[in-house]
């Protein structure tokens, strides 16, 4: 019993010092342990430990569709969950106020045409010396005033929801309409419907909320030590989903309770696989620095643990080398580790439990 305790203690002490231990094992012993071998998969860049991240919709990608004028909603052609395109007609509003706006515009348009004709006539008369310069200036001023008023009322019609084509048609045919098209301001998905057909609304009352779910933000809480090594443009991976994002910003404000700071990344490609509010595991991609240990991908079955330490078993000419490793990332059946290896070593991928038992003195003689 004392001998076993001494063996375990001495092995653990040497492991904590990050030293490799060679176990002399014959081919027959390894076969009896049912050890199977595999190869390391080197990675050009390392991954940090896994951090939780919340999927957030950027505020710039949400629009509230409001009533352009007070009136009665006569038609709504989309509902929650439907996808719409920018400029698409998604409803109809009947508004008596629109009739008054069109009437005002037609009056100003008529006055502007009359003043334009007067200006052309007075320009000819002034050229022939028939009228004074003062008369010419008064006509010019009246023309400019009428033009400004016409453009002002034209802009009011645009704000009320009328398109340029409808305004031109109004000026040509002098036929007013009392219906206003409700237009989608962005492409996206209807997230909320605030009004129903038949509802009477005032100007600027919300009717729909539209959101474009691409790109999305990943809001991560990262320990300050790791966050200090992150810069905008760095890569973030979602290993379980096979997606990649890019860091936008690092918030230099600490959470005093857990000493973490917020890192925000944007994801466009594959964003449809995520939902707003979802919590996902992410890992920061760390470029391998000169002098640092390389990282490798290995099967989960290849890694043994002893307390908080992890190790792999490397094939050696005299048997097996117990090599301490640092686990950077865990994803399903694959682990990303960091170890002082060349990358061409052969490691045990099966029979690891038997090797660990032998190493701890629980097997063999």
Image (spheres, grey):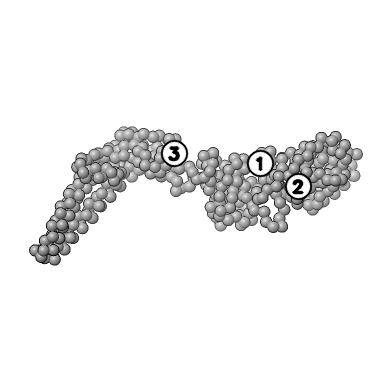
Nearer to the camera, 231 or 26: 26
Residue named by callout 1 = 331
| Disc 1 versus disc 2: nearer the observer | 2
| Residue 189, disc | 3
Mark 1 → mark 2, Cα distance in angstroms? 23 Å
Left/right of residue 233 with respect to residue 193 in the rendered view: right
Query: Residue 14 at what x, y percent from top left?
Result: 82, 51
Q: CA distance from mark 1 to mark 3?
A: 32 Å
Q: Is residue 259 visible?
A: no
Position of the N terminus by quadrant = top right
Q: Residue at x 44, y 48 (%)?
A: 60
Q: Earlier in the sequence, mark 3 or mark 2?
A: 3
Image vertical order of residue 229 relative to residue 30, above or below: below
| Residue 179 placement: quadrant | top left
- Asked if labels 3 and 1 touch by Cβ distance under 8 angstroms, the answer is no
Residue 252 to residue 321: above or below: below
Q: Earlier in the sequence, mark 1 or mark 2?
A: 1
State left or right for residue 251 relative to residue 89.
right
Mark 3 vs mark 2: give the one in front: 2
Say which residue label 2 marks.
344
Q: Is residue 206 left or right of residue 37?
A: left
Q: Secondary structure at mark 2?
A: loop
- Residue drawn where x is 64% and y is 46% of the image: 50
């Amino acid at each position: 019993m004392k001998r076993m305790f001494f063996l375990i203690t001495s092995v653990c002490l040497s492991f904590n010092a990050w030293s490799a231990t060679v176990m002399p094992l014959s081919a027959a012993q390894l076969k009896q342990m049912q050890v199977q071998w595999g190869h390391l998969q080197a990675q050009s860049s390392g991954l940090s430990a896994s951090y939780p991240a919340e999927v957030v919709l950027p505020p710039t990608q949400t629009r509230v569709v409001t009533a352009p004028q007070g009136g009665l909603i006569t038609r709504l052609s989309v509902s929650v969950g439907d996808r719409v395109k920018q400029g698409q007609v998604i409803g109809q509003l009947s508004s008596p106020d629109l009739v008054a706006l069109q009437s005002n515009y037609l009056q100003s348009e008529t006055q502007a045409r009359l003043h334009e004709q007067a200006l052309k006539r007075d320009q000819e008369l002034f050229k022939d010396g028939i009228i004074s310069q003062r008369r010419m200036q008064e006509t010019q001023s009246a023309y400019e005033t009428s033009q400004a008023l016409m453009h002002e009322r034209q802009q009011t019609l645009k704000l009320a929801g009328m398109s340029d084509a409808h305004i031109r048609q109004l000026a040509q045919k002098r036929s007013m309409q009392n219906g206003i098209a409700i237009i989608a301001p962005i492409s996206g998905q209807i997230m909320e419907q605030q009004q129903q057909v038949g509802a009477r609304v005032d100007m600027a009352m919300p009717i729909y909320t539209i959101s474009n779910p691409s790109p999305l933000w990943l809001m991560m809480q990262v320990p300050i030590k790791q966050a200090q090594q992150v810069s905008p443009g760095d890569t973030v991976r979602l290993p379980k989903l096979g997606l990649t994002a890019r860091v936008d910003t690092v918030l230099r404000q600490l959470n005093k309770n857990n000493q973490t700071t917020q890192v925000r990344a944007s994801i466009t490609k594959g964003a449809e696989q995520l939902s707003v509010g979802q919590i996902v595991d992410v890992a920061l991609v760390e470029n391998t620095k000169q002098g640092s240990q390389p990282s490798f991908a290995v099967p989960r079955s290849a890694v043994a643990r002893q307390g908080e330490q992890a190790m792999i078993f490397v094939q050696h000419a005299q048997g097996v080398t117990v090599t301490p490793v640092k686990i950077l990332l865990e994803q399903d059946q694959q682990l990303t580790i960091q170890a002082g290896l060349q990358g061409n070593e052969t490691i045990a991928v099966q029979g690891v439990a038997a090797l660990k038992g032998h190493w701890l003195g629980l097997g063999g003689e």
